[in-house]
Amino acid sequence: MHGSHKLQIGLFGANCSSGRAVTLVPERWSGSWPDNKKLALMADQAGIDFLLPIGRWKGYGETTDYQGTTLETVTWATALLAITKRVTVFGTVHAPIFNPVVAAKEMVTADHVGEGRFGLNIVVGWNEGEFDMFGVEQRAHAQRYEYAQEWIDVIKMIWSDREDFNFHGKYLNMKGIRGKPKPYGGTRPLIMNAGASATGQSFAVRNCDAFFLQASRTSLEESAQRVHRAKEAARAQGREIGCYTVGVVTCRSTKKEAEEYFHHCIVERADWPAVTASWH
């Protein structure tokens, strides 16, 4: 993401079993470390701009346990940054689960391993069942972002030149905070967020370098309008923000073969109970 490509392309969800395909086909993505390592090296050599993992702690059960086997994202990113040369690698971090002092230290370590190629994808809330695993209660929607604002403020302060500072907020009360080393090269890691609500979008525009927005399901024009509104909102605050979204690619030698395989994989052989579970 530090390169000159006007259109930046990344790979999403490789740290999870099945990736982003809720399918029964035996060749579905393993999510294993050897396959992740091979994929990262291929992506790095091919000029792919970034690798973005999914923060997942529990799968969706059913036949395939969709995304049930996962690699933790910050350690995953650190390992991949050590073996690649140019690709940006993100860690996806749930703010309510990670203490900000610990998270800042973990991420700056990854940033030094990658010589400035680490990125933070901050998650404010997600699946209730995952939060239950940690004994963490999901806050009301607006309060999630209030907490996340304090969390990211502390992270940025640790990454700045400040030392031995206190932070007293509504949710965080911390004293004598110190964090060394600082991020690699004197610049902080890229920050991404995918807030979908008005509150979430406002948080992303205010705090992040990259906004992972939901594309329209009906038209490219509507997606372009969403990008335009996000960029204008950032410029109104004197900032620039990059906009990203998901595109699903099925690769085969011909369009006909691709369409047939897509139907086989995603419709005929879908893990429909897991699809249902992922929407609840």
Image (cartoon, rainbow, N blue to C red):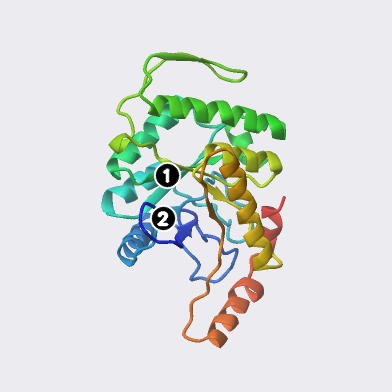
Q: Visible in this render: residue 193?
A: yes
Residue 210 higher or lower than 108, as above or below: below
According to the picture, the residue beneath numbered tag 1 turns out to be 119
Marks 1,2: beta carbons within 8 A? yes
Q: At label 2, which amino acid type do we have? A: Phe
Percent x, y of residue 187: 35, 37
Q: Position of residue 239 (x, y in %)?
A: 52, 41
With 158 as the anchor, is 125 left or right in this view? right
Helix, strand or loop under label 1: strand
Residue placed at 66% from the left, 73% from the top? 267
Question: Could you tell whether 153 is left or right of 39 in the image?
Answer: right
Residue under label 2: 50
Q: Nearer the viewer, residue 169 or 124?
A: 169
Q: Quadrant of residue 171?
A: top right
What amino acid type should be assigned to the residue bearing mark 1?
Answer: Gly
Residue toward you, 208 or 251: 208
Dot 2 falls on a residue whose secondary structure is strand
